[in-house]
Image (spheres, rainbow, N blue to C red):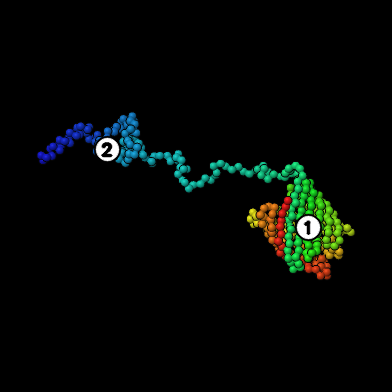
Amino acid sequence: MNRHALPRLALAVALVACFGGPAALAQDDPHDLHQGHGQHAPALPTATDEADVDHSQHRPAAADDSGTDHAAMGHSMDHAGMDHSTMDHSGMDATAAPTQPRVPIPPLTDADRAAAFPELHHTMHHGDGVHGFLLVDRLEAWDGDHGTGQGWELQGWLGGDINRAWLRSEGEREGGETHAADIELLYGRAVSAWWDVVAGVRHDFAPGDSRSWAAVGVQGLAPYMFETQATAYFGESGRVEAVIEVEYELLLTNRLILQPAVEATFTGRDDADRGVASGLSSSEAGLRLRYEFTRRFAPYVGLVHERSHGGTADLRRDAGEPVHDTRWVVGLRTWF
């Protein structure tokens, strides 16, 4: 043996004797030695007394367990022996969607439908007392092939929710002459949520001599939001006339509204004084586009076409009057 090796061997024996022999050196945590910059960590307990030791006092929170012998510490990591059927894996699959809502939605019942859409009765009032309303639906002018002209159509009521007095009037002037004008005073009673029955009188100022009619009809809101008026008129000498008017409001925007309207007049017998014959005597179709600056102030532009039919058209030809007329109109719609 080399003489220089003897001192080294003696030093090694002394170190082993001082620190408890090879078993103690084998239990040193190499990471604790590295973190302590060369200082030796205290010896860990053996497997026999491990249950009595608090491991949290010997291992740092960020310690690396890669060098620790878990088998000696009594922790079994054998996953093959674990019962996975008892483990809840529902939170592990993030893509799986539940088949039912967390809070089940109850099925829709007849009671729910009745609550959402209550049936309106005559006993349901908007308020007690007498109220009134006046709508000037058409107040317009035009410059057509047969001269300038003006036209109007208005209706209003006074009363409550069930019983009302109605006022209706319409007419036309062209070339400084009144071609048609009438006024109606009617009593109306609501018979359903959307329909009224009306009865009263109508007085014609033109064409021809003034005359009066008894009137009866219905008015209201037909399915698909069509405003409808159907009125029959009974005059002297068995004269009968029926007028049907339907209009619809198409909201292009909250303020820009397109209003198509169709009106047809039927006559029961020939009336030469008024220039009408039996059957479908005349019809009118209009398309008006209005802009509501406010709900009460809405100017509009429109296109109107009028036509006479059957025997009425023949009577107008014989009198040298036009059978049909198409014109652009400008006007105002307002209400009070």
Where is residue 190 drawn, in percent x and y? 77, 47
Q: Are marks 2 and 1 in contact (CB under 8 Å)?
A: no
Look at the numbered disc 1 and give the secondary structure of its residue: strand
Where is residue 20 drawn, in percent x and y? 22, 32
**First along the sequence among labels 2 and 1:** 2
Residue at image coords 78%, 62%: 173
Residue at image coords 13%, 39%: 5
The answer to whether 292 appears left or right of 197 in the picture is left
Name the residue tied to disc 1.
170
Examine the rendered structure and indicate whether residue 308 appears above or below residue 294: below
The answer to whether 12 appears left or right of 157 in the picture is left
Residue at image coords 30%, 40%: 67
Inspect this view and state whether residue 300 appears.
yes
Amino acid on which disc 1 is placed: Glu
Residue at image coords 73%, 51%: 336
- Frontmost of labels 2 and 1 is 1
Density class for disc 2 (Cα within 10 Å; few <14, some 14-19, many ≥20) is few
Amino acid on which disc 2 is placed: Gly
The answer to whether 289 appears left or right of 25 in the picture is right
Which one is nearer the viewer's eye here, 82 or 165?
165
Density class for disc 1 (Cα within 10 Å; few <14, some 14-19, many ≥20) is some
Look at the numbered disc 2 and give the secondary structure of its residue: loop
Going by the picture, which residue comes out furthest to the left? 3
Where is residue 151 drawn, in percent x and y? 76, 60
Query: In the image, which disc is placed on residue 36?
Result: 2
Examine the rendered structure and indicate whether residue 280 appears above or below residue 11: below
Label 2 to label 1: alpha-carbon separation: 107 Å
Quadrant of the rendered image containing residue 33: top left
